[in-house]
Amino acid sequence: MDVKNAFLYGKIQEEVYVYQPPGFEDPDFPRVYKVKKALYGLHQAPRAWYETLSTYLLDNEFQRGKIDKTLFIKRYKGDILLVQVYVDDIIFGLTKKLCIEFENLMHKKFQMSSMGDFTFFLRLQMQQKKDGIFISQDKYVGEILKKFGFTEVKTASTPIETQKPLLKDENGEEVDVHMYRSMIGSLMYLTFSRHDIMFVVCACARYQVNPKVSHLHAVKRIFRYLKGQPKLGLWYPKDSPFDLVAYTDSDYARASLDRKSTTGGCQFLGCGLISWQCKKQTVVTISTTEAEYVAASSCCGQVLWIQN
């Protein structure tokens, strides 16, 4: 569901005054107005809208998530309804009866538009099948390939060359920093569903301050890899168990700039991959054992967060 003019529903607690915009002033009676409800453009508007929505849901027997405060849960006679809020967009499910009741409940308070089954959200594509759910971003892959001119290129079998590590390359030729950052930003958004490019995108992102030709070649190779593998995604089978299993690993002092190690990790809930990380460690370890302990500690922290 999508809320129409969401920010106009919020009531603000602070004293805020607005004056008539240029071209609409009354020269004889200049006025300022005290604002009771939020307006688009006010810093208080998102918070005021969230307070209005959350109060309404809590008054109607919903419970707020302990970790994710934008998740609301309602249980009724063995059924469960999950409501996830993203600004003015609302995703909700599970059983059909509760979904219809929730739609009626929201229409009583707000002007809403129902978007139908969940298929496309924040450039994430959802395919709900009988045996599970598939999440991908292949439409977004096509968009960025077209945007940066990689629709007619030779494909690469891997996203990074394993025999040529990225270096600072101080004597290399400089490239357009704005284009480089734009390419990195587009790829970072793609890592929401494509963990296969996570490591190389994070490695290339370290050189955004002063990128060289060698760094740009590495980024271009990622796009060439995506050209050959545009439809990979995440599969969540229907009858998967709920066992939480985590994996983690670390290299040792492979970062050429500061000799730090890189931690990689992923967490599965049954057969579904729900979280993954690739991050350079904050400390300089003096042995492979210490690097592994740092990685294990980071993974344990992620597991505890997921359990909560």
Image (cartoon, grey):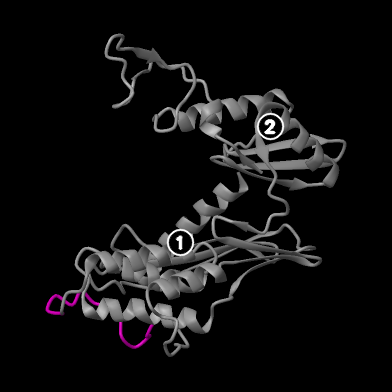
Q: Is residue 77 left or right of residue 186?
A: right
Write the residue at 47% across / 88% down.
157
Circle 2: residue type: Gln
Question: Please, is residue 154 above or below residue 183 in the view?
Answer: below
Mark 1 and mark 2: Cα distance apart in space? 31 Å
Q: Are marks 1 and 2 in contact (CB under 8 Å)?
A: no
Q: Residue 210 got which mark?
A: none
Residue 250: image location, x then y, percent: 42, 70
Quadrant into which the C terminus falls? top right
Magenta range: 160-172
Write the residue at 61% across / 38% down.
3
Which residue ends up furthest to the left in the rendered image?
171
Quadrant into which the N terminus falls? top right
Residue 26: image location, x then y, percent: 31, 15
Residue 163 in the magenta stretch? The answer is: yes
Q: Residues within 10 Å of mark 1 (few under 14, many from 20)?
A: few
Q: According to the image, label 1 marks what residue? A: 189
Residue 299 in the magenta stretch? The answer is: no
Which of the 4 quarters of the picture holds residue 56? top right
Circle 1: residue type: Tyr
Question: Please, is residue 15 above or below residue 44 in the view?
Answer: above
Observer-nearest of 294 and 122? 122
Question: Please, is residue 165 above or below residue 88 in the view?
Answer: below
Q: According to the image, label 2 marks what residue? A: 63
